[in-house]
Image: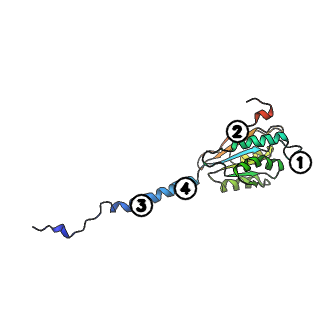
Amino acid sequence: MKKRHRGLRRKPIFAPLLLPVSLFMVLALIVAWFYDSQATTTILIVRHAEPAGPLAADPPLSSAGERRAALLADSLYDVDVIRGLDAIYAVPLQAAEQTARPLATRLDMPVNRADDSDLGKLMDGIVSRYKGRIVLLVARGEQLPLITAELGGHKSTPQVAEDEFTNLYIVSIPWSGRTKTLRVQYGLELAGVTP
């Protein structure tokens, strides 16, 4: 007796699964890329350290300001255990640039000049350019509440006192959900406060 199926070729068992599995893999990669690109953006905002004179004269940092800038560098050097900071910005003020410089030097990064004539435009530019990343902005004391509000953070961030240099604001902007504003302090020992 002859077998009728002897001339038929056998189909591989996994052939029907090849297309659906391939499509699933491509879709998974697209979703992973989307979520990564939409991840939480974190903006660290700090006031410049103590200047050597009135800000109107655009002075350099005082010796206390230089120590505070070094403490800021120590505090933020490895702020993200995986990648670290992605960018550093400073408003056009000698004290702001010098506050950012020690950290920028340690990270081998430039200090980008932040045009603070339009804070809304500045923040929109930083958030869109560094989506899902971590950025430090060194600003003037009176700008801190305005910047946190521009980023969608807490609207009642307190005004910064003339002699207050210890605040570091962390604004977390998730791709979905509410923006959070955190305040931490650094260099309290320079202000005569025991932690």
Q: Earlier in the sequence, mark 2 or mark 4?
A: 4
Crowd band around label 2 with a 10 angstrom C-alpha radius: few (<14), some (14–19), many (20+): some
Secondary element at tag 1: helix
Does 95 sit above or below residue 11? Answer: above
Q: What residue did someone put label 1 on?
A: 56
Q: What residue did someone put label 4 on?
A: 34
Residue 81: image location, x then y, percent: 61, 44
**In the image, what residue type sits under mark 2?**
Arg
Q: Earlier in the sequence, mark 4 or mark 1?
A: 4
**Badges 4 and 1: C-beta atoms under 8 Å apart?**
no
Q: Earlier in the sequence, mark 2 or mark 1?
A: 1
Q: Is residue 187 visible?
A: yes
Left/right of residue 32 with respect to residue 75 in the rendered view: left
Secondary element at tag 3: helix
Left/right of residue 22 with respect to residue 74 in the rendered view: left
Q: What residue did someone put label 3 on?
A: 22
**Badges 3 and 4: C-beta atoms under 8 Å apart?**
no
**In the image, what residue type sits under mark 1?**
Ala
Q: Between residues 96 and 145, which one lies in front from this camera angle?
A: 96
**Badges 2 and 4: C-beta atoms under 8 Å apart?**
no
Residue 121: image location, x then y, percent: 73, 55
Q: Quadrant of the C terminus?
A: top right
Q: Earlier in the sequence, mark 3 or mark 4?
A: 3
Residue 155: image location, x then y, percent: 71, 42
Q: Name the mark on residue 183.
A: 2
Q: Quadrant of the N terminus?
A: bottom left
Secondary element at tag 4: helix
**In the image, what residue type sits under mark 3?**
Ser
